[in-house]
Image (cartoon, rainbow, N blue to C red):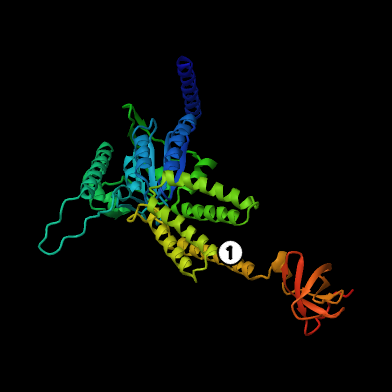
Amino acid sequence: MRALARQLAALALAGVSLGAMARAAAGEKRPVALIRIERTIDVPSAEYLERSLEAAQRMDAQCLLILLNTPGGLGQPMKDMVEDLLNAPIPSIVYVYPAGGFAQSAGTFITLAASIAAMNPATTIGAATPVDMIPLPTVPEPGEGEKKPPSSSDAERAKVVNTFAELIRVIADTRGRNAEWAERAVREGVAIGARKAVELHVVDLLADNVDDLLAKVDGREVSLPSGRKVTLRTDGAPVVEIPASVKERFLHVLSDPNILLVLLVLGGLGLIFELQNPGSILPGVVGGLCLVLALYSMAVLPVNYAGVGLILFSMLLFLAEVKVPSHGVLTVGGVVSFVMGALMLTNTPLAPALRVSWQVIVVLTVLMVGFFLFVVGAAIRAHMRKVQTGLEGMVGQRGRALSALTPTGEVFVEGERWRARSADGNIPEGEPVVVLGQDGLTLLVRRQDEPAGGETRR
C-alpha cells in the first residue's frame, strides 16, 4: 500500500510539473491561491489552512495568499497554523486586510510565520500575550510593607509567557524579522500600526489592496524549507480563491462563545418544555441537538465549567419557580445565576474575542425570564381554574329535585339522575337545588335560593 501511495504521489507531481511546463511554454503565469481567515482563530481555522495548502499544491499555485483579520484565538490551533506555514512546500503571503482590520494575539504569530508579511496601511498588529492560556492570579495584593507571597499561578503565568515569547522570537528569526519587537508583543502586549510595523521591519511591505500587493511582491525570491529558492511572478497572475467548506464554516460558527451560550439556553429550554409537556417531541429533539452541539463548542473553547454549572443551576431555579411559589425569589436567583454563569462561561477574561457579549447576555436573560414567566403564569392559571371532573367538579353544580327529598330522594344534575340527601330540611319535587358535596354515590344538596338561568329541566 505504501509503495502504491508513493507511485500515486509521484504521478501527481509529474502531472503538476507537466502542467507547469505547458503553462510556461504558453507564457501563462501560475495562479495565486487565496483564502480568508477572519474572526477567532480556532480548530476549523487550522483545518482550513492545512487543506488550502494541499489544494494550492494540487492546482500548482505559485503561492498561497492569506487575507487575515483576527482579534486572536486559541493557542493550539495557532501553533498548528504556524507549523504549517513554516513547513509549507510553497511560499505563503499573509496580508492583514481590509482597512481597519488587525492581526492581534494569535494573528501576530501567524503573520510573522509567513514567507512574506504585508499589511494594509490602516491596519494594526501586536498585543500577542497568550492570555487565553494564562490562569488568573489568585493571590491577593500585599498590604503596605508586606511582601507578596509566591504562588503557583505566578509561576504558571511566567512559564506560559516565556514559552510563547521564545516561540515568536524563533519565528521572527526564521523569517528574518524584528525578533526584539516580537518578544515585546508577547511579554508587554505592545501593538503598532502598519507603517510603524514596516519601519521596524516587523512586516515586509504595505499594500492598498490585493492587486497592489501582487504587483509589489512580483519578482521577490522566497526560500522554502527544502532549501529551494522560488521567484514569484504574481503581477497579473490569476487569483483562485479556495473557499472554506460547509463543515469548516459550520464548526467555525460553533466555536463562537456567544453561539455556545445560545445553544446551552435553547437546549435547556427545549428539555424543560418537553418535561412540562410530555409527548411534545419536537422541543425535546431540538433541545437534545443543541446540547450535543454545545458539547463540541465546549471541547474547542477554553470553557470555565463553573460558568456552565451556574447556567444549569439557573434553569433549575426557574423550573423550581414553576413548581414552588416563591413570590419571585427563585426567579431573581435564577437571573443572577444565569448572568454570572454567562460572564464566566469562557476562561478568557482579558481576550474580548473569546468573551460572551453583553448584548447576547441581556437578550438571552430576557428570553429566559419571559419563557419561565409564561410557564409560571400558565401553571398558576391551571391551579386556580375550577375543577371540572370528579367530586370537586360536582360541588356547586345546580339541578332540580326529581322527587321530594324527605330528606332523601332523587335529583337531576349535569344531565344525570342522582340519589340525593337534603341538608336543608325537606325539599319539594321540582325545587331547584345546589350540590354541597358527595357521600359515596349520594349527593348532599340544599335548596337554591335563586333559580339559575339556563338550568336543565325535566
Q: Which residue is mark 1?
A: 375
Front in this rendered view, residue 368 or 98: 368
- Whether residue 47 is visible, yes or no, is yes
Give percent across and percent down for residue 162. Answer: 22, 44
Residue 84 percent location from the top left of the image: 37, 35
Residue drawn at 29 percent across, 54 percent down = 192
- Mark 1 lies on a secondary structure that is helix
Would you place residue 206 above or below residue 363 in this image?
A: above
Q: Which residue type does callout 1 highlight?
A: Val
Q: Is disc 1 surrounded by few (<14), some (14 to 19) or many (20+) residues within 10 Å?
A: some
Residue situated in front as seen by the camera: 361 or 368:
368
The location of residue 145, given as percent across then percent down, is: 9, 62
Left or right: 425, with 80 as reference point: right
The furthest residue to the front: 406
Between 228 and 355, the residue placed more toward the observer is 355
Q: Residue at x 84, y 67 (%)?
A: 417
**Total marks in image:** 1
Quadrant (top left, top right, bottom left, bottom right) of the C terminus: bottom right
Residue visible at 39% across and 50% down in the picture: 305
